[in-house]
Image (cartoon, grey):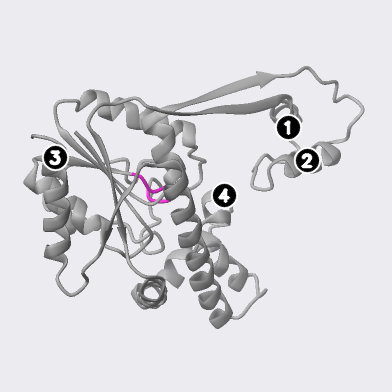
Amino acid sequence: MIVVICGPTGVGKTKLSIELAKKYNGIVINADAMQVYKDLNIGTAKIKEEEKENIPHFLFNICDVSKNYTVYDYQQDLRKIIKKYKDKNIFLVGGSGLYIKAGLFDYQFEEEKTKIDFSSFTNEELYQMALKKNNNMNIHINNRRRLERYLSKKETTKLGNNILYNNVYFIGLTTDRKNLYNIINKRVDKMIEDGLIDEVKNFYDNKIFTKSLNTGIGYKELYKYFNNEISLNEAIELIKKNTRHYAKRQYTFFNNQLPVKWFEVDFNDFNKTIKTVIEYIKSKTII
């Protein structure tokens, strides 16, 4: 079986995945778009080695932060692992709904090429056109060939609703909004205490300005601080605010795009939550 464990940050997805993987002799696969990157640890709340409890984990720390890892890359990598471990119970854990959808459903990527004559455009004009297409693209202004190739491509997707695998269950962990926002705020404070500023400063000092750092919550805000655009307090509050907004978007995607069975987390006794989820899995399948 494949069990997807989704939900917003801080609700216990990682802990649940470990307990289920132990009980069902399974493996854990990352479904968080930022946790695929090496060295993005504190800001992504990435699982620590000692927390894995000897459970095999996949698709964590697989891409250098200087490179761009796409939804298509994730789709291909996830499907290879599912095929390789088809006889194991798989626990897919994370909050990136699009990655989950692309990996498990008939989500197809296509690339259309159009022939355009760019000879009348300067490098600066091509560069601005590329930025307009994607503000996070990182092609150098002097690399004309790559700019032209980038502008000639038109990527399209076909988002299907047919799941590709049997025995797939979608578990969502949730809590009320007030409690979630409190968890998020405390989590950000803990990240700062654990050294998030130093983690981000290392990338900034090494002049790494890739998509993962320009768009990742916890990283893009501190880059603004290092650029003297905002104060440290403003950056921290912005991280909290952006995380709260992201949680809202996560719920919207999960509720509209995935058949999630939601479970209210008992933070006073998380074992009760684990037990409830196990009972649900037993009611759906025989393992």
Task: Work out whether residue 261 or residue 145 is closer to the camera in this orientation and state it.
Answer: 261
Residue 7 coordinates in the image, percent (x, y): 35, 55
Name the residue tied to disc 3: 26
User: In the picture provided, is 151 more to the left or to the right than 125?
Assistant: left
Q: How far apart are marks 4 and 2 (CA)?
A: 16 Å
Query: Are dots 1 and 2 in contact, CB under 8 Å?
Result: yes
Query: Of marks 1 and 2, which one's residue comes earlier in the chain?
Result: 2
Residue at 33% over, 67% down = 175
Q: Name the residue under label 2.
A: 127
Nearer the camera: disc 4 or disc 3: 3
Circle 4/circle 2 CB separation < 8 Å: no
The mark that comes first in sequence, 4 or 2, is 2
Span colored in magenta: 31-35
Residue at screen point 68% across, 26% down: 154
Q: Say the numbered circle drawn on residue 147.
A: 1
214 displayed left or right of 73 = right
Is the Cβ of the residue at disc 1 closer than 8 Å to that at disc 3? Answer: no
Q: Is the magenta stretch mostly helix, strand or loop?
A: loop
Q: Mark 1 or 4 closer to N-term?
A: 1
Q: Is residue 134 above or below residue 13?
A: above
Q: Residues within 10 Å of mark 3 (few under 14, many from 20)?
A: many
